Image (cartoon, rainbow, N blue to C red):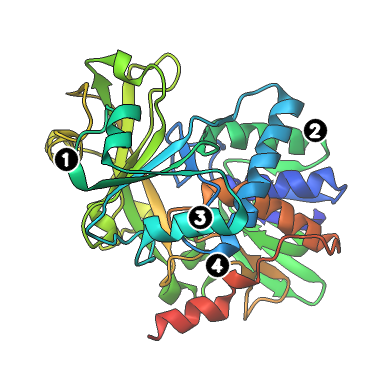
Amino acid sequence: MHYEVIVVGMGAFGAATLYQLAQRGVRVAGVDRFAPPHDQGSSHGDTRITRQAIGEGAAYVPLALNAHRIWRDLEAHSGVPLLEACGMLMLSDSRVATRGHGTADFAGETAAMARRFGIEHALLDAAAIAQRFPQFTGYGPHAVGYYEPGAGYVRPERAIEVQLKLARQAGAELFTNTQVTAIESYAGGVRVRTATGVLTADRVISCAGMWSAGLLGGPFPQLLKVCRQKLYWFELDEPERFATNAPVYILLDGGADTSSCYGFPPVRGENAIKIATEQYADICDPENLDRHITQADAEAMYEQHVAGRLAGVSRRLLKSKVCTYTITPDFNFLIDEHPELPGVTVVSACSGHGFKHSAAVGEALAMRYCGDSRAADLSAFSLSNAAGWATR
């Protein structure tokens, strides 16, 4: 079967790209080794933070703003709620500039982006934080806060499901539970070999997430690393503290990215908060990922990041999940042509901050394929940038 485009992987970026291409009348197919939305990769866990002022860099802000527009458009088309704009509170200590996703002063850069792009926000001192958000108790008189009312969270499984459903309705073909074993360029286009047969296309867009390095070869095994992440849901003892005025939160702490944590207010019908950290040191094998979280893990998480910092949260762990980050040397995305496989576009390695941008990246890729000059600029995420960082 021959297509104009085949999208490999139908997680956050793949589902968005497939949907946007199908909406434009492109003859497109999507292939995934599982049946998305699923919990085997990086696009699950009930909620994903979405911000508009992006401390990781100016190239991300237009994507974040476009994504918010697309989420609302998807809600209107599907009737499914996807984006909860509950606000975001970023807390830090005024005496320390704290890193985040490779940025030396993450809170400071976030505020700078808000000013630069005219995004509504407020800078809060310790007294204002205590008055407006008394559930956060861990920073004392040196606390400073960045509050962004238009931020919040997206429901990742719902977003993927909606985009795949709309893509199928627009004519896309979906091959689920179909593992891609190889991608090969040839004179007439690109072959996608699967466990059940061969598909061909004029172009392939690979959104394979944590399987990208093994599937794509070339320079990618040296540029991409996969790191296991642990997500926790702790039950609330005092749900009234989170009943109103409960934002998503990023609690910045210490001089390393891994000292901080992030979390969410309770979603409707669930008396728990989700909270997680990020780690970039322990590299895992995607084919042998340990998906078990121990009680000792949960107790350590509670002691370090919940006790004394979030009032009204119990030690009782209601559930836990494991997901992965696929990370580049500079913590940026990697979106570029494969240097050894003509006709193959490599997308993702979203480095732990991708879902909020995925809808807009899919739109930009589809517009670019269709020759639309209004496509958002993705040049900041080139292979040469990532390779340059890898050699430093």
Q: Specify whether residue 330 is in view.
A: yes
Q: Is residue 33 left or right of residue 126?
A: right
Packing grade of label 4 (10 A; few <14, some 14-19, many >=20) is many
Query: Mark 4 or mark 2: which comes first in sequence?
Result: 2
Circle 3 residue: 54
Query: Mark 4 or mark 3: which comes first in sequence?
Result: 3
Q: As shown in the figure, which amino acid type bears the numbered disc 2?
A: Gln
Q: As shown in the figure, which amino acid type bears the numbered disc 1?
A: Asp
Label 3: element kind: loop
Q: Which mark is residue 172?
A: none
Q: Which mark is residue 169?
A: 2
Point 70% across, 62% down: residue: 204
Q: Is residue 263 above or below residue 25?
A: above
Circle 1 residue: 297
Query: Mark 3 or mark 2: which comes first in sequence?
Result: 3
List x then y, in percent, for residue 307.
14, 33
Judge by depth and name the residue closer to the eye, 194 or 37: 37
Q: Is residue 139 above or below residue 335?
A: above
Query: Mark 1 or mark 3: which comes first in sequence?
Result: 3
List x then y, in percent, for residue 84.
54, 29
Q: Which mark is residue 334?
A: 4
Query: Mark 4 or mark 1: which comes first in sequence?
Result: 1
Point 48% across, 34% down: residue: 87
Packing grade of label 2 (10 A; few <14, some 14-19, many >=20) is few
Label 1: element kind: helix
Q: Is residue 203 above or below residue 246?
A: below
Q: As shown in the figure, which amino acid type bears the numbered disc 3?
A: Ile
Q: Specify whether residue 55 is in view.
A: no
Judge by depth and name the residue closer to the eye, 252 or 360: 252
Front position among marks 4 and 3: 3
Front position among marks 1 and 2: 1
Disc 4/disc 1 C-alpha distance (Å) = 32 Å
